[in-house]
């Protein structure tokens, strides 16, 4: 790993640049020892800032780890990443160290920082070149094994960095164990942060108490000649404090023009953004009309909940609502709650096929006191893929058992139902296209049809990513266009570009869905827990299921021309 540490003191400064070549897949004692050491340090009681810095270093080490490459291609990519990291790190050090040195120790610190920055500017690129060369060499050495293992039907384990015969059952057991361990580590990290905050709050309270005692002593000394009068004043002061405390209890509510949206989410008027987000995510799943088909009022409650979150999750709209209630809001800029929920969660009816969208994980996965780390996001995505693969294998089992007719009738009914949900038809077609593509490639892996589908699928993936990139550019231009406008003009412009932002969110979700479904299909079709004949039957059932999804049509498009996404 390449790590950069800067330590500044009043007396002087010291810096250390360390390049360690280590293969996490080897499971060496150094890796586990470092983790144990890090945990031990955390338990000793760090400040909240130190805990956050340690988490950032862990994420950086995870990204820059010199892991065993799959073949020469991944080795070359890893080598270029190491080289880029070294060059960028050296450049940043050359610029930052003199500045930090000047702030710490004036001219002397600037000179010392400049010298160490120049040293780092040379050492880090050299280290990056060495690490890159090592990765390219390792990739070249691993290439023959990759060719042989791939021909034998083995799969590359990106976690353990080795080739193996894939087992969906074993993968499911492994992710369950990893999930338990990760939850334990996250609990320890949160506990350390809470302890650091409590320690800081206690220290601040002690300082405040000391200051108050000093002030009380001065006041007692100045008023020693009139104790009787002081007692009367203290009595009045005590009664005044009681009244003031009673007023303070209602002050927050009195300063808000309307409590409707706060009551809809079940939060206080001084709730943080994290509290509001957590309340919405919890209630939205409970009150969604799909989960309450027999409740005629479910849709109205869900719509009210969505409106409340859209207003309170934005600081500007929340301030206007607090000041003037609903009259201070632009209701025309509201997104339909069903559309908003779909973009955040995906329809829950699709969850067995695509799991929870990454957009939903980013919005709802973090607690009020923590943010999602790179390691946690990677784990959640792997868990999502494995769980969807287990469910897909279960769905395909009737077809594998020979009951194709019942399977197709059941899935056709389910696909028609899915198509009636918001974005349901489009999402069915996205999933169905991937199912058919992966099945054709599996069934024709040694034929021209399979090879042709492979290149067709690659072209489609590039097209999807390009469409998402274009949508991001449009969103950026739209957001820049409102700068300099007054509040009314901004509201009108944002409402005009609402379809642009929705389309951008959808394009990113499509990239997420397609990538996830591809990985799910690969796991299902390479599972060595079943026979080759059963894997072939799974592929045939997957192709049939994909065609069913591609033929699903929403009631809106059943008659007349098909609507576009923006419509």
Image: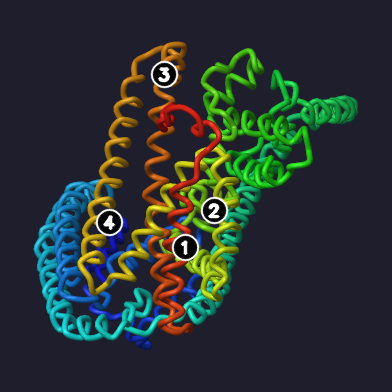
- Element marked by disc 2: loop
The circle on residue 376 is 1
Q: Nearer the viewer, residue 470 or 475?
A: 470
The circle on residue 556 is none
Give the quadrant of residue 57.
bottom left
Quadrant containing the N terminus in the rendered view: bottom left
The circle on residue 457 is 4
Tally of numbered discs: 4
**Does residue 99 sit above or below 13 in this rendering?**
above
Instruction: Categorize mark 3 by other alpha carbons within 10 Å: few (<14), some (14-19), many (20+).
Output: few
Looking at the picture, the colour scheme in use is rainbow
Instruction: Categorize mark 2 by other alpha carbons within 10 Å: few (<14), some (14-19), many (20+).
Output: some
Confirm or deny contact between disc 1 and disc 2 (CB under 8 A): yes
**What residue is pinned by disc 2?**
365
Dot 3 or dot 2: first in sequence order is 2
Dot 3 or dot 1: first in sequence order is 1
Instruction: Categorize mark 1 by other alpha carbons within 10 Å: few (<14), some (14-19), many (20+).
Output: some
* Residue ID at (66%, 31%): 303
**Does residue 180 sit above or below 360 in this rendering?**
below
Dot 4 or dot 2: first in sequence order is 2
The circle on residue 496 is 3
């Amino acid at each position: 790993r390449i790590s950069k540490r800067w330590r500044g003191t009043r007396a002087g400064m010291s810096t250390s640049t360390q390049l360690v070549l280590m293969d996490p897949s080897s499971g060496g004692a150094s890796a586990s020892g470092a983790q144990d050491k890090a945990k031990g340090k955390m338990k000793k009681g760090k400040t909240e800032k130190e805990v956050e810095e340690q988490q950032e270093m862990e994420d950086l080490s995870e990204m820059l780890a010199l892991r065993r490459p799959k073949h020469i291609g991944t080795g070359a990519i890893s080598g270029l990443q190491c080289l880029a990291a070294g060059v960028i790190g050296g450049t940043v050090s050359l610029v930052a160290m003199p500045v930090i040195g000047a702030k710490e120790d004036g001219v002397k610190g600037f000179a010392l920082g400049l010298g160490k920055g120049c040293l780092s500017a040379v050492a880090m690129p050299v280290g990056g070149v060495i690490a890159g060369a090592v990765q390219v060499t390792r990739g070249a050495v691993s290439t023959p094994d990759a060719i042989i293992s791939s021909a034998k039907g083995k799969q590359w384990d990106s976690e353990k960095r080795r080739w193996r015969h894939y087992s969906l059952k074993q993968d499911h057991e492994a992710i369950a164990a990893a999930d338990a361990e990760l939850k334990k580590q996250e609990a320890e990290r949160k506990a350390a942060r809470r302890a650091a905050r409590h320690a800081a709050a206690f220290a601040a309270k002690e300082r405040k108490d000391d200051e108050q005692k000093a002030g009380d002593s001065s006041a007692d000394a100045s008023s020693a000649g009139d104790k009787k009068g002081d007692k009367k004043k203290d009595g009045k002061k005590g009664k005044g404090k009681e009244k003031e405390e009673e007023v303070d209890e209602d002050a927050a509510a009195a300063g808000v023009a309307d409590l409707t949206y706060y009551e809809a989410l079940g939060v206080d008027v001084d709730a943080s953004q994290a509290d509001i987000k957590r309340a919405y995510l919890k209630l939205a799943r409970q009150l969604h009309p799909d989960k309450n088909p027999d409740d005629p009022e479910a849709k109205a409650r869900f719509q009210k909940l969505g409106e409340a979150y859209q207003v309170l999750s934005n600081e500007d709209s929340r301030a206007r609502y607090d000041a003037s209630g609903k009259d201070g809001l632009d209701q025309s800029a509201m997104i339909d709650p069903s559309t908003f929920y779909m973009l955040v969660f995906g329809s829950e009816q699709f969850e067995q096929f695509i799991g929870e969208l990454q957009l939903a994980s980013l919005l709802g996965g973090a607690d009020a006191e923590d943010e999602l780390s790179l390691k946690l996001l990677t784990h959640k995505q792997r868990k999502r893929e494995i769980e969807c693969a287990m469910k897909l294998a279960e769905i395909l089992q009737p077809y594998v058992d020979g009951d194709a007719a019942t399977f197709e009738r059941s899935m056709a009914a389910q696909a028609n139902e899915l198509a009636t949900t918001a974005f349901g038809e489009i999402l069915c077609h996205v999933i169905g296209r991937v199912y058919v593509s992966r099945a054709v490639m599996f069934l024709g892996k040694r034929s021209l049809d399979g090879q042709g589908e492979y290149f067709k699928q690659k072209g489609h993936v590039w097209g999807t990513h390009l469409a998402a990139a274009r949508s991001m550019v449009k969103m950026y231009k739209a957001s820049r266009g409102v700068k300099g406008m007054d509040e009314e003009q901004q509201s009108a412009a944002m409402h005009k570009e609402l379809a642009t932002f929705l389309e951008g969110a959808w394009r990113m979700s499509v990239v997420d869905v397609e990538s996830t479904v591809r990985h799910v299909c690969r796991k299902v079709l390479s599972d060595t827990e079943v026979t080759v004949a059963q894997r072939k039957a799974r592929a045939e059932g997957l192709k049939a299921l994909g065609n069913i999804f591609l033929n699903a049509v929403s009631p809106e498009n059943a008659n007349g021309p098909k609507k576009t996404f923006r419509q």
